[in-house]
Image: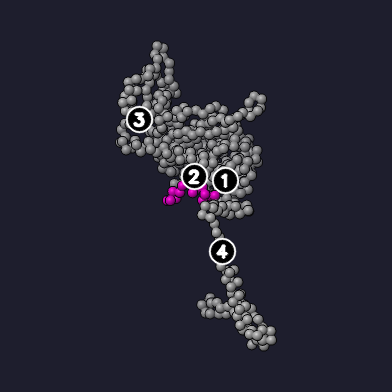
Amino acid sequence: MSLSAVRGYRDESGRTRQRTVRTFGLVDALEAEFEDPVAHFRAVVAEMDGERLREEAGATIEIHPGQRVDKRESGRLRRRAGDALACWRLDALGVEAAVRNGMRGRGVGYDLNAALRLLVCERLLDPGRKRAAWEARDSHFFRAEPSDDDVHRALDELDGLSERIADACNRSIAANSGRDESLVYHDVTNYFFECDPDADGAPQEGRQQGAQAQPHRADGAPAGLGGHTDRLRPVQGQHERLRDAAAGPQGAPGKGRVVVVADKGMNRSDNIAGAVAGAAHYGAAQYVRDVTFDAKTGEALEEAGVRPQIDQAAIDEAARLDGYHLIVTSETDWEDFRILDAYREPWRIEESFKVTKTGGLESRPVWAWTESHVRAHFLTCYLALLIVRLSQRAPPSHPSARALLEAMRDLGC
């Protein structure tokens, strides 16, 4: 008779079976070595069972509640599956077709669309410098063969195609997404850029400012790049950007009557004239009389013997209402609640500025030097923001921009 350790199990038919795990030997031989072989090997089997259970038990990991777990830090190259959403959106928006058509006949020795895909996907998945985007080119599913120099050269080409790309996006969204075109929200944000060296080549102290104006539609998606970014002059005021934003939406695909909604910084007569000249409508006040405006440009015209005068009566009438919060608009046929709702909506563009700057896309600092490169940088940021906004609207849960970006960044294999 021998002693063995066996383990019970059920076969495919459900019948109970046993398999031998280990044979210890004949009892007669074991009695010569152990005083009680059965008791001894029962203890051995119990130890074997304990070791097996420890191996099969789940692992317990202790993590501080405030600690962030990043699955991307695995030490191996992961392909970023979040590319799929970004590349699909770029193609659906007509961006790649616009680039191909714009580059037709140009002698460019690299794939400009590949460079654009790389810059936009990196802005979404791991925002940073352009060189860092190029260094991470092998982590994407699409082919990104442009050299480091080609990626930087591509910025000049993309700047020249920015209007074509923005128009393609607007046409696609107007045709496919049911975009609300009746309201345009306008605001300006500031960015800071490094100063150019002085005449002797020494770097200047401090930073120059640049302003970026961006119009938004009533549905919260950006409508275009807005005013250009100027890195060589001090920042322009908001009122100097409004006329471009008011004129830009007119004549675009699907446009009807467009109302521009802006804050009190727009209370200037030239803005009102510019809006009216461009067939837009406004929400601002005017306290100057005896002024004639150019119907095309909105500029104040000088007339012999006529000097602009402060409209004191209008000022007195406004002073009579001090203490009240007034909203001035051309939309006199709107219901009160509709005017109030329209004026409350510009929070959407403020939230978009937050997403672009610090809420996931990290558009600053601006790792670019020339004006065309700076504008191309904001083109890639605009496309990334547009992809985020359109993707937020797709699922029923309407996730936040940060939650969507984190989900895209977690997708990898």
Dot in front, 1 or 2 = 1
> How crowded is the residue under tag 4: few (<14 C-alpha within 10 Å), some, or many (20+)?
few
Residue lying furthest top: 305
Residue 257 found in image quarter: top left
Q: Nearer the N terminus, badge 1 or badge 4?
A: 4
Dot in front, 2 or 3 = 3
Residue at which label 4 appears: 59
Asked whether, in this view, residue 58 is left or right of residue 399, the answer is right
Report, in whole angstroms, how far the alpha carbon at label 3 lies from the one at label 1: 43 Å
The residue at 32%/28% (across/down) is 321
- Above or below, comparing residue 181 to residue 75 in the picture: above
- Above or below, comparing residue 183 to residue 267 in the picture: below
Task: Identify the amino acid type marked 4.
Answer: Ala
Residue at which label 1 appears: 126
Task: Identify the amino acid type marked 1.
Answer: Asp
Report, in whole angstroms, how far the alpha carbon at label 2 lies from the one at label 4: 37 Å
The residue at 47%/28% (across/down) is 237
For the record, the magenta segment spans: 395-409
Q: Secondary structure at mark 3?
A: loop
